[in-house]
Amino acid sequence: MKKVLSYMNVKSLAYDALVEYAISSLPIRIREDGLRNVYISSWEKYLLEHAKPKHGNIFRQDGTVMCLGVNPEARYVIFYHESLPEERKQWVVAKLLYYIRCGFAEEHVGEYIIPDEQAKAAEFASFFLCPDAILEECGIRSAEDIMHHCQVPFPDAMRKARYLKNGYKRFELPSLEKMVVEQFSHDIQRVKCG
């Protein structure tokens, strides 16, 4: 039986990732060498560097645009299509990071992602790339401001703005949210003063 993660579990996973990866400023950019145990590359670059794929057990998201696999060298592998605009690439890579953080990649290697999990992955990407505690501290609430500061696609910024307006409760995860706010403290001051 599949375990369904609650909204708070997904938010906790995202905030825990921000802390673990020592991310401390907006916009959040997931660099190819920026995450421990995760290899991130465009599929085209990977094919140029390696004669043939050696990462078996890959499952795909959105057809051939993105895929995630388990690899003994880097542990996890995330590929993206190099034609994706930067903000879209970051969003989809963050969604795939969800599958690593929640253990789904380890348990379901080779399977297609089910729609319910894609919704949770999008929720994770929203908390990871647009942490509501940081947006609230900075006074960033409109979709336009979220898109500008977080550099995420407009539809995703709109969903985040609606969430901040209708559902955000300060310090739902007291110690974890406080850690994230502290970690972003210099960037919060930069945004407030800018």
Image (cartoon, rainbow, N blue to C red):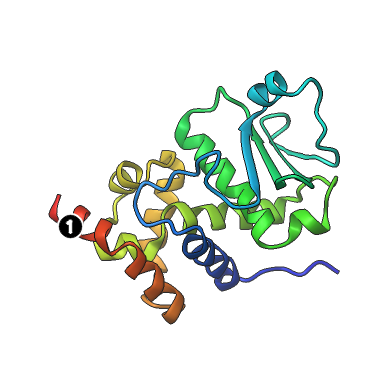
Q: Is residue 52 visible?
A: yes
Q: Position of residue 161 (x, y in %)?
A: 37, 55
On screen, residue 123 versus residue 69, left or right, reads: left
Q: Position of residue 56 (x, y in %)?
A: 85, 38
Q: Is residue 139 visible?
A: no
On screen, residue 13 versus residue 180, left or right, reads: right
Q: Which residue is mark 1?
A: 192
Nearest the eye: 192 or 155? 192
Instruction: Tell me the quarter of the picture where residue 54 sits.
Output: top right
Residue type, mark 1 in image: Lys
The residue sitting at 36% across, 65% down in the picture is 183
The residue sitting at 41% across, 60% down in the picture is 131
The residue sitting at 75% across, 24% down in the picture is 50
The residue sitting at 45% across, 59% down in the picture is 22
Badge 1: how crowded within 10 Å, few (<14), some, or many (20+)? Answer: few
Q: How many marks?
A: 1
Image vertical order of residue 150 relative to residue 43, above or below: below
Q: Position of residue 127 (x, y in %)?
A: 48, 59
On screen, residue 177 versus residue 16, left or right, reads: left
Image vertical order of residue 62 relative to residue 7, above or below: above
Nearest the eye: 168 or 136? 136
Nearest the eye: 141 or 81? 81
Say which element carries label 1: helix
Specify the quadrant that holds the N terminus: bottom right
- Residue found farthest to the bottom: 174
Q: Position of residue 178 (x, y in %)?
A: 37, 75
Instruction: Tell me the quarter of the picture where residue 139 sits.
Output: bottom left
On screen, residue 154 versus residue 46, left or right, reads: left
